[in-house]
Structure formats: C-alpha cells, structure tokens
Image: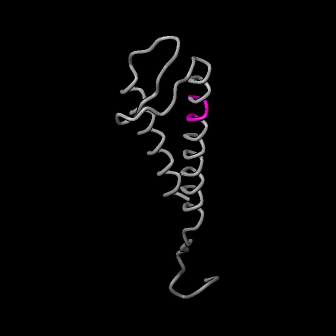
Amino acid sequence: MFILGLLLLAATGAFTGLVIAGNLSGGPEYTVSVLGQDIATMNTLAVFCSGLALALIFCAGLSAVASAAAHRRRERPRTHATRPGGIGR
C-alpha cells in the first residue's frame, strides 16, 4: 500500500506539473497537451472539475501512504526488558 500510495502521489504531481507547464496560454477554450500531444479541449468548468479529480486522487495516495506508515508502526515487535533472574524478581 505504501508503494502504491507513493506511486499515486508521484503520478498526479508529475501529470499536474506537465499540464500546467504546457498550457500556460489559454482562452475560453483550453486545449490540454502533455508532452506535445493534444489530449482534449476543455472549457473552464471542465478544467476545474479535472483539477478536483486530480486533487482527490492525490489525497487518496496521501491517505494510502499515511495508513501504511501507521500500520508499519503498529507491526513492530515489542521488546520488553527482562530481569536476569526471570519474571517477578
């Protein structure tokens, strides 16, 4: 889960960065392109909704990383110091 969460975080971050870098000029209709390939033509509402979707995917990845890290903390074996003579001395 930890690696899947990190993969989601990295993928959404990289995709968002590439889309923003490649589409700085705009108008009422935006042609979204990534790495020189035109993906879609979107209006302002579609761009806003796709941003919400990317934010939700990012949060899902962040949640997966956080839950995996919390699970790892709970799974560590507990070591108790015992006295040389055994229990109860």
Q: Looking at the image, which residue sits at the far right?
A: 88
Instruction: Name the foreground residue: 29 vs 69.
Output: 29
Up-down relation of residue 27 to residue 59 (above or below): above
Instruction: Name the foreground residue: 76 vs 9.
Output: 9
Q: Residue 71, percent across and down?
A: 59, 60
Q: Main secondary structure of the magenta part?
A: helix
Quarter of the figure that contains the C terminus = bottom right
Which residue is rendered at x = 62% and y = 19% of the image?
45
Up-down relation of residue 68 to residue 80 (above or below): above
Which residue is rendered at x = 42% and y = 30% of the image?
33
Magenta span includes 35: no
In the displayed structure image, the side of residue 53 where residue 22 appears, left or right: left
Numbered range of the magenta stretch: 51-55
Instruction: Name the foreground residue: 76 vs 69.
Output: 69
Q: Residue 79, percent across and down?
A: 53, 74
Which residue is rendered at x = 55% and y = 44% of the image?
62
Up-down relation of residue 17 to residue 10 (above or below): above
Residue 24 picture quarter = top left
Which residue is rendered at x = 61% and y = 34% of the image?
53
Up-down relation of residue 24 to residue 53 (above or below): above
In the displayed structure image, the side of residue 23 where residue 66 appears, left or right: right
